[in-house]
Image (cartoon, grey):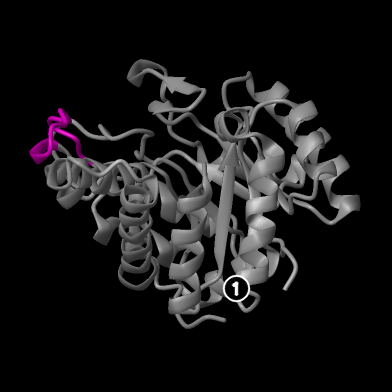
Amino acid sequence: MPLVTTKDMFEKAYAGHYAIGAFNVNNMEIIQGIVEAAKETKSPVILQVSAGARKYANASYLKKLVEAALIEAPEVEIALHLDHGDTFELCKQVIDDGFTSVMIDGSHLPYEENIALSKKVVEYAHPRGVVVEAELGRLAGVEDAVNVSAKDATYTDPMQAVDFVKRTGVDSLAIAIGTSHGAYKFKGEPELDFERLKTITELLPNYPLVLHGASTVIKEFVDTCNQYGGDIPGAQGVPEDMLKEASKYGVCKINIDTDLRLAMTAAIRKSFVESPSNFDPRKYLGDARTAIKEMVKHKIVDVLGSNDKL
């Protein structure tokens, strides 16, 4: 099966009150773990590439790894998505390179400039069969090139969201309701603004919304990292029951990045300590791939509810 867009994925997810997992990829083992999990659970999946991932792995290598995944798992619906593209030029480049979905993130810009940039990307993408995600409101935290302090974070205004979607024509909208990037999402009790989410959903019926910064920061992986020499104190993510609740109100795509990194790092740290004489990357990276696969399967089945949808 060739790469697909998220259009049909989101229509089915909205109607079925579940969400599609969007997983950030950086190397072969991460892609293999995610796609194997999607294959075994019969789930559609979105593979995301950030500007940082393109710089680290080289865009050509990542594209070819995704093409290999299509060959190995032809029954899985896979969309290839640019995460946090911040310029028209970058979005144009990946569209021309075969991506089926792009995010133009103008959330750091004044409102009218965000509209103008997002509309420009839509006007280039749509005639080429590519869908566009934009962001309104700003999430706190750090992820690759995105770095927003708590004082600069702003929640999405519902009425502004309606105006933004109407004027830009974007296919989905990432909103800010309290999630944040990185492994340290909350101080004190986790809290998401579900009333704001419900209002946006009511004002934009049948329209797919997106949650960024939605990794749950699984405690098992944090504990394993710390047990085997890491130092990640006080990491806290979005509780899984909150993510399941969000999918009932128009959230069709949930981004997961930190949990992938934690799963991989925890497995590698454990392997190094338990097998100190091993110097074969196939062993410790194989362990990491298995950890990613099992974590993604858990997300798909127990959090996203996208299993058995192929």
Main secondary-structure element of the magenta-colored stretch: loop
Residue 277 or residue 4, whichever sits in front:
277
Tag 1 secondary structure: loop
Total number of numbered discs in the rendering? 1
- What residue is drawn where x is 29% and y is 49%? 263
Horizontal side of residue 61 vs 14, given as left or right: right
Mark 1: amino acid: Ala
* Quadrant placement of the C terminus: bottom right
Residue 29 or residue 120, whichever sits in front:
29
- What residue is drawn where x is 44% and y is 78%? 40
Q: Name the residue under label 1.
A: 73
> Where is residue 2 drawn, in percent x and y?
75, 68
Residue 251 or residue 5, whichever sits in front:
5
Q: Identify the image quadrant of residue 114.
A: top right
Q: Give the range drawn in magenta.
A: 226-236
Residue 240 in the magenta stretch? The answer is no
Q: Identify the image quadrant of residue 152.
A: top left
When the figure is inspected, residue 275 is found, relative to residue 3, above or below; the finding is above
Horizontal side of residue 281 vs 98, given as left or right: left
- What residue is drawn where x is 74% and y is 49%? 99
Mark 1: few, some, or many residues within 10 Å (few <14, many ≥20)?
Answer: some
When the figure is inspected, residue 302 is found, relative to residue 62, above or below; the finding is below
